[in-house]
Each structure stands twice: as C-alpha cells, then as structure tokens.
Amino acid sequence: MKANKLFTVDSIATQHLLMGLPMPQHPLMSIARFEDSKGKTVDETGHFMNKFYSIAIKRKCTCHTIYGQQYYNYDEGMMSFFAPDQLLSWTAEDEMPKEGWSISIHPDFLRGHPLEQKIKEYGFFHYTVNEALLLLPKEEKMIERILKNIYEEYHANIDNFSQDIILSHLSLLLSYANRFYNRQFITRKHTSSDLLIKLESILTEYFNSTQIEENGLPTVKYISDKLNLSPNYLSDLLRNLTGQNTQQHIHNKVIEKAKEMLASSNLTVSEIAYHLGFEYSQSFNKLFKSKTKITPLEFRGSFN
C-alpha cells in the first residue's frame, strides 16, 4: 500500500493477507484470533476501505487508528464495528493486537437471512473508532462465549446448516452489543449531561447568528462535528437519554425560536420561516403544526 493512497479491500482473503492472518476458510465470512497473526504486512501510512462488515475485539494493542484528522488508541476490552465502504487509515508505526478477535462478513453471506436487513438497523456499524464499545469484564466473557461458538462452527465441516448456525450466533452477538452500548450510554450520564448542555449551546448560538439565514437549518452532521461525534452515535445517545434523536432536537429548537418570534415581533409567518432557514413557508407551517397541533397564526392569535 502506498502512503496516503486509498486501498480498496475487495475480498476477505486480501484483508487476511494484509493483517498477517491465516487464509479464511470461507470466501464470504471469516473469524480469526489476533494471536494467530504473523503481523501486518503494511509498513506505510495509508487509507483502506473494506467491502464487507467487520467486527473486532482488540486487546494489548499499540495500534492507532485515524478517523478524519484525529488519532484514537485501542485499549483493552474494546469492541469496534465497521460497515462496508467505511474509510479508515493506519499509520506506519501500528502493530497488530496481541490478543482478540476479528470477524468479517461479506453482504452476500447475509443474503436471504433476516440479519441481512437487521444489521442495517444497528447504528454502531457507523460509529467512529473513538466511539468503540467499552466492555465490562462480565460482558466480555459473554461475547467471548459467542465468539468461540462461531469459531468452532466456522472450523467444523461445512454442511447445509453451517451458515444458519453461524448467522444465528452472530445475530445474538449483535443483540448483546446493542444492549451493552445502551448500558454504556447510561453509565456515562455525567458526560452525557455535559453533552446536552453543549448541544443546547451550539443550537442557541446557531439560531441567534446569521448562519441560520445564510446556510439554512443546521444539519445533523454539523451538530455532530461540533461535538466531535459521529451522526449515528450522537443520535443513538440522545435517543437513549431523551427519547429523541438529533434531528428532533433541532426541530424542537426551531419551534422554540419560532414561538419567540411569533409572540414578540410583527414579522409575517413567511418572514419568520425565511429567518429560520426554510426555503418554503409551507414546510415551516407543516413542522410547526406537527409539533404544536396548531398553526403559527393560531399560536400568534392566542396572545390577542
């Protein structure tokens, strides 16, 4: 791999080669222990993009992963998930983890199975690497048992039941990961409370500046970038804390600001819609009524 050049990893076999792992037993799915790695075969910094789903538990790892312009360390007991076509990078100094697991699943391996659609619902496959799942010891033991079951089935004689059994175990693993991420959101409530304060500050600053007229409504990506989180992680975290995702928080701020302007100014509804970043006043009216059950004019009329 040449430095800073995008390298597309089309096959699981190629991935194993780059990671110094034994060749996979199946072209569309693999599970391997990092203990069996002979070390990575790439000694230069560069970018890569896998064409399949990847799951990793890394322990005793000195590797650093780049996402955007930031570096993130893997410590012990961290579980990461990557969807197809997610861009990642490695530095020349990286080493393979001394312990842990690597699972790779090509989308074709999921064809016709309920997991083919279900896996797309798990937002953590689109979290950034600094948003890895920090497993508690008892959680890691549960995940380890499932991984061993997958590993044993993967290395058993292939028959008509193999794929369904492996995918059943994988489905269970993802369900537990989803539960453990929710636990992680709950146990980080102090940090999460700070995040809610920062979110409110970002929205208030945006709506009180000229940005709203110049750029329209703030996007989920704009907010998540300001908070140094991925859009999926932020929405999942907010949903867990407040029952509403990032887009709903943005809309709540729109309604709050709209009520303020309707009650304290002589601007028309169309002018208020424009000031709040709406291209069409009909869109503003529809959002306002969906949130308040009355129209903007009816809200204004309640003050007369």
Image: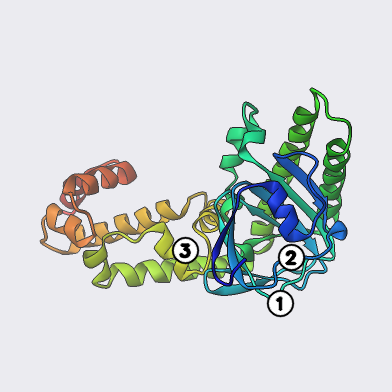
The mark found on residue 41 in the picture is 2
Residue depicted at 78% across the width and 61% down the height: 58
Marks 2 and 3: CB-CB under 8 Å?
A: no
* Image coordinates for residue 258, horizontal then vertical, percent: 25, 57
Would residue 10 be found to the left or right of residue 177 on screen?
Answer: left
Which is more foreground, mark 1 or mark 2? 2
Q: Which mark is residue 104?
A: none
Instruction: Specify how the rendered protein is coloured.
Output: rainbow
Q: Whole-percent x and y of residue 290?
A: 31, 42
Q: Quadrant of the N terminus?
A: bottom right
Q: Which residue is mark 3?
A: 224
Q: Position of residue 32 (x, y in %)?
A: 81, 50
Determine the CA span between mark 2 and mark 3: 35 Å
- Quarter of the figure with residue 36: bottom right
Residue type of the residue flagged with mark 2: Thr
Does residue 270 lie above or below 93 as drawn? Answer: above
Q: CA distance from mark 1 to mark 3?
A: 30 Å
What is the count of numbered marks?
A: 3
> For this view, does 294 lie left or right of residue 198?
left
Q: Amino acid at mark 1?
A: Glu
- Give the quadrant of residue 21: bottom right
- Image disc number at residue 93: 1
Helix, strand or loop at mark 1? loop
213 to 8, vertically: above or below = below
Structural distance between the alpha carbons of marks 1 and 2: 12 Å
Residue at far front of view: 2
